[in-house]
Amino acid sequence: MSKVYFSTWRGEMINNINVPQDEWKESAYNLPAQYDSARDAKAFIGWDGVALFKGDIDVVRLATEYAAQYQIYSEACGRCAPGRWGGRILYDLMDKIARGEGSVADMDHLKEVSRTMQTTSKCEIGKTVPTPLLDLMEHFEADFMDLIDNQKASPHYHLKEISYIAKITAPCTDACPAHVDIPGYIEGVRDLRFDDSLIATRQTMPLAHTCGRVCPHPCEDECRRTNLDEPISIMALKRLGADYETDHGFGFFHPIEKKASTGKKVAVIGSGPAGLTTAYYLALEGVHCDVYEELPVLGGEVAVGVPEYRMPIDKYNKDIEAVADLGVNFITNTKVTADMMRQFEKEYDAIMVATGTRISKAVRCQNERPEIEGYWGAIEMLDQINLWDKYGIGEPVDLTGKTVACVGGGFTSMDVVRCSIRAGAKRVIMLYRRDEKTIIRNTTYEEYHEAVEEGVEFIFHSAVDRIVDENDVLKSLIVDMYELVPDPEGGRPNLEKIEGASYELEVDYLIPAVSQSADLDLLPEEWALEQTSWATIKTNGKDYMTSRKGIFASGDCEYGPMTIVNAVGQAKRAASVMARYVQTGEVTLLDDEIMEDHLRKMKVYDKNEKVTGWLPGLPREQSEVLSADERKTNNREVNLGFTQEQAIAEADRCMRCYYIAMAAV
Amino acid sequence: MVNFTINGQSVSCEKGETILNVARKNAIYIPTMCYLQKTTPCASCRLCSVEAEGVEGFVLSCQAPAIEGLCVITESDSLHKERVNIMKMYDVNHPLECGVCDKSGACDLQNKTLEFNVGTQEFSAKDQHRKIEHWGRINYDPALCILCEKCTHVCNEVIGDDAIDLYFGGYGSKVIPKNSETLDCTFCGECISVCPVGALVSSDFQYTANAWELSKIPAACAHCSAACALEYEVKHESIDAIGQEKIYRVTNDFEVNTLCGAGRFAYDFENRIYGKDKEAFLGAIEAIKKGAIRFSSLITNEEAMILQRMKEKLGIKLFNQEALNFSKFMKAYGSTSGQSLYSATLEHIRSSDAIVIIGSRIATDNPAVRYAMTTAARHKGARITYMHPIEDALMQNTAKQYVKYEVGAEEGVMALLAKTLLEGKTLDSEISAFFAELDLGYLEAESNVGDEEMMQLKKNLTRTKKRTLILGADLIAHAKAENIARLAGLIEKHTEFKVMIVAPSTNTLGVSLICDLDEESEGYAVGYNARGEFVLSSFGEGDLDMPSLNQQEGTFTTIDKRVVPTNVALPYNGYVLNDLANALGIRAEYTIDYTSQLPYSVGFECNAFDTLNARYGNAIKDSRGYELKSIEVTCDGVLSSVDELPEFNGTVLYACNPVLQFTPNTQKAHQLEEEACLRGSEQFAIAAKLSDGDRVEFDFGTLRQKRIFKIDTALKGTIALNPAYDLGLAAMVSSYRYQSVKISKVGS
């Protein structure tokens, strides 16, 4: 909610012209009236309208600058006749009026060209750039006519003090924690330019193989195609570029050429997605990185947590190689201690803590004691399985004839139960407090159904009350059953225990996979780093510096257990901040990043928007998966990916919903 | 099937077909500026927007697949209005140089401007300076460019060079060389061909003729066995030489067919003579009577038929070692496959999702096959395994697996391949025994093809549905060619693979079917475009001149097993082979009288020349001429055991022309001037103790050759490429393509 002088944003019509400022109506949207801590915005203009925060804005100049941004930013576009020429005509005519040389006919031509752009352009930029311009021409016609009639320049035409800051976005890009240029990489697939596709991805996401497979794809929840039929299968299209690079044995397609060495160096603690991402983008900026890894293998939880059948290690290793290709130095088998951190602070120009969350949380039931044989933390179990399956380190896990119960509901618990099936368990049970719908929402539809097909028993609305042991050997669990009781007040229904429904479940293993917490022993006590209430490292979520200068944190140890793409997004931003920090000692955000945060707050996707100009009813492509019998006894990759024809058909469904947003500051 | 209507007309199509394609098939016009059937839609012009009932806004017909029950409208007032506006925008600042532009008269922008009646320019935009680029055989003028993207699409998706890119910059967008300062490509010129305006033009042709002055002669390309459809564009040579015709350029129907640079730029290989040399003619008759003719496969089917008739009538011998090798190869192949012809076509390759190619440097041997493979790689994601002793940088973005085998080991590699592909198939006991007895350890060690590579190859086939095995010229001239062919025949017969055998020369397949060839022997022979004691030559150095292939009408038998016609682009004033035949009592008025007499028993039809179609129709596939019938043959082939694999030690050269060069005909072309050099990698140079630019001498087979050695940084490994196209009558290599040689430096 923000007070506005005038707004047509998302179809609202707020006009406070000639209204005293204290009586101004508020906009229904989270518009960026305050640009950053130091500056107010004068106006915000974008694909869906325009909002003026001040009365003294020069609307003709604003319109001209917005049209000019289309010219500047058209590296993302310039791909269709109406957009390319129309966009230029729009700008030239606007500028002509703004500098005092316009005519009435120019106004008509502007409207004519706008209509053609709106109806025929290839992407949403071409279709939407005219929208706010037409709004301004309609509601501020007098301002335009004044310039035309008197052949004079617009009031701020020569004024240099106002910055016009623009940003390209898209609903999917906005929804992606790593802000991947999704329309760009899909365009690469559609044009069969897989190298371009990969480069588009790698601008903000180095783990293309990985996030082409195991990303929970929040972008697909905010895909505009949903308004027409079904969302694009965004995630699956990511792997085409990565596969092209790998399959043809090319060198690595990096998004920019690695810059010359700055002579600066950074220590990265942890080689999981956040650590790899930090190192990748810092290395591209010419900053040397030493990455310290506690385990004998690189990759963090994606390596030792995500099972082979979901994420083949040879593909993940390719992503890691891309990072190593930039000269990043990896040091394995090294658990960083507080003493080392003290030393690092002296030796390095900055430190990134990206140690994840590797402590399995307790189930919180009676008699829960780690020393009970058969009580086995999810992280420890997955470590053993993955180290053996992927690297031949340690020993295999054999659960032949055993009954395994897992308490969880998230991705980790799914990995536990499906790995248990593959390890030969006789019976595998997932105990989950809530219902089927919630488990699907917390994981994915595919993940849940594949587990069911493989024979995992899901017991919903259940919780372990007590562990029963005999001489510290697990025997059984006392399981309580719950039901949802509607709140008579109309609020959220409550989970209530069903008295008398508890029963005893005989198991050999109980694997808690409820959540994980961060091991922060490496942080020197005297640093007294601020922590969140859930015991992770605290940052402001924008620049990712901790309460101690030069010490940054990203990924799960900052956010709590979350997704790969979240870790990548945080680390990408942090790397950008760190690259400047090591040079200047200051913590700053780029305008692009400030705009990125504003847009996310506003949310680019509008689920109520009516999409026109596209044929509805084209179903989303489904990739082939191995049948349960083919997959449940081995580690073969379950999802076989799209065939090329499927991928092209799916890419063809993408509507290229690029938008330009601009703030006048 | 999907059923829907366009302008009220009921139409149907396969699932996934676009509205535009269905409209075109049903002869319903939708305007386009950027659409190219053989690539993915560029979707840049937006002219093909249509309306659909119940759908708000316009739908892009080139990209939208038809859906059941849709009612499409291709013409309406609002569509027309926007199409006119798009054309108005296209015309903004388009230079008014139609008077001199090469494209004038055949320009899509002109045509559509007229079609939409854009007579005035209402909008304007600031003009910008655009620098004209000179990229060797290609010039690019960004001011004329409408950014339709056809060129970049075709270069990447069909050719595979991926040498041009779009520089995105809105109004300042332009085509640029990809990752390079200047254009570095194979110069196929297909980008020129698809350019709808005069932005990409041939630097040689530019400003030499107007499109409407040129006569188009439909013909088949004479340079390789693809015999692609092309049109020679002909006009008088100058105003001082009325009647003296000249080929100005070659064009192709790019919507359906693709040309390489040899086809496009090497057209001026005609044999220019003035009048008939009666004395030489009589000499030729006497020479032929002496009992033998040696000839190359750069001849038409009809000429081959005449030679066969000479053999039948005069009892002379016919030597063509290259075609004889091929004929033996095909017979051996048929003896296990059960068919006289292989079954794959270029179209089959294009739609394959798995391809194995062995024994060819295909990008130079047969660009049409390479383009088909590129199409398969991009559009079908084909898993391509490229098996050859020399890696080819041109194939890197096409092939997903490179299997390097030792020179000479082809038979062993083929045995390993057949064993891998035939695993699990029900085979005769003899065949099973053959595979059981293979000494795998020896074969793998000597061929250097490991079990892991074969497992990978097999893995590449998972989930693939349409598979092609391509066999190259290296195999055909191999000492164990027939055993290799029998192994290939088994693969054709027992697996899902369709096989293609790449004939080494333009009409090798035709010659091998038409002529009853003899084993080479010493003694007197007339050479027809081949060495001999008396030489009939279209290359211009013989005892009696003969017409070149752009001066003849007749047919070729193509790699697609089609009999396709070619026509006379330039007149020829001298004697032709048919004249010699007539003088020898083999009577026919015209050479093309033999078209209907081609042997039915091997699959030809009795069609008269004039009934054969030389152009593509609206059908997407090659419908020129007719398709040869494959004849069922008895499977009586017996595999001989694979014993010792030959070893090639020391310095090894590979008979291989540079891209665009094939024969003395291409060598003659004024646009393809380049020096024929021995080209080797840096590694080769070190091993052979040579430096770039050294003059060297060596015996290649029986021929003493002197060449300049050049280091080619795109090459890897220790085998150098030795061209043959510049060797005149000795240019046709019929022996195994690899030779161990002793290289000595001269004159340093």
Image (cartoon, rainbow, N blue to C red):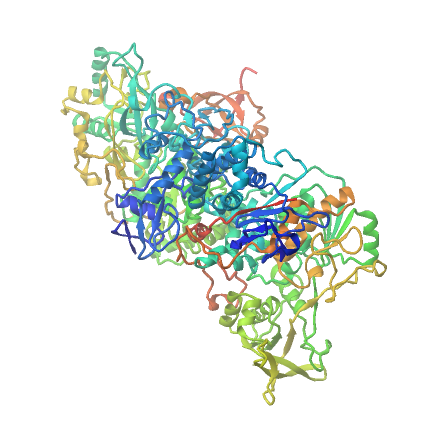
Q: Quadrant of the N terminus of chain A?
A: bottom right
| Image vertical order of residue A65 relative to residue A574, above or below | above
Q: Quadrant of the C terminus of chain A?
A: top right
Query: Can I make out residue A427 in this image?
Result: yes
Q: Position of residue A151 (x, y in %)?
A: 54, 31
Left or right of residue A157, residue B96 in this image: left
| Image vertical order of residue B20 relative to residue A100, above or below | below
How many numbered marks are there?
0
Which image quadrant for residue B115?
A: top left
Q: Position of residue A463 (x, y in %)?
A: 62, 80
Which residue of the protein is positioned furthest toward the bottom in this rendering? A500
Residues A385 and A361: in front is A361
Q: Position of residue B526 (x, y in %)?
A: 27, 21
Residues B101 and A385: in front is B101
Left or right of residue B304, residue A402 in this image: right
Q: Position of residue A568 (x, y in %)?
A: 64, 54
Residues A13 and A309: in front is A13
Query: Can I make out residue A80 in this image?
Result: no
Which image quadrant for residue B553?
A: top left
Which residue of the protein is positioned furthest toward the top in this rendering? B240
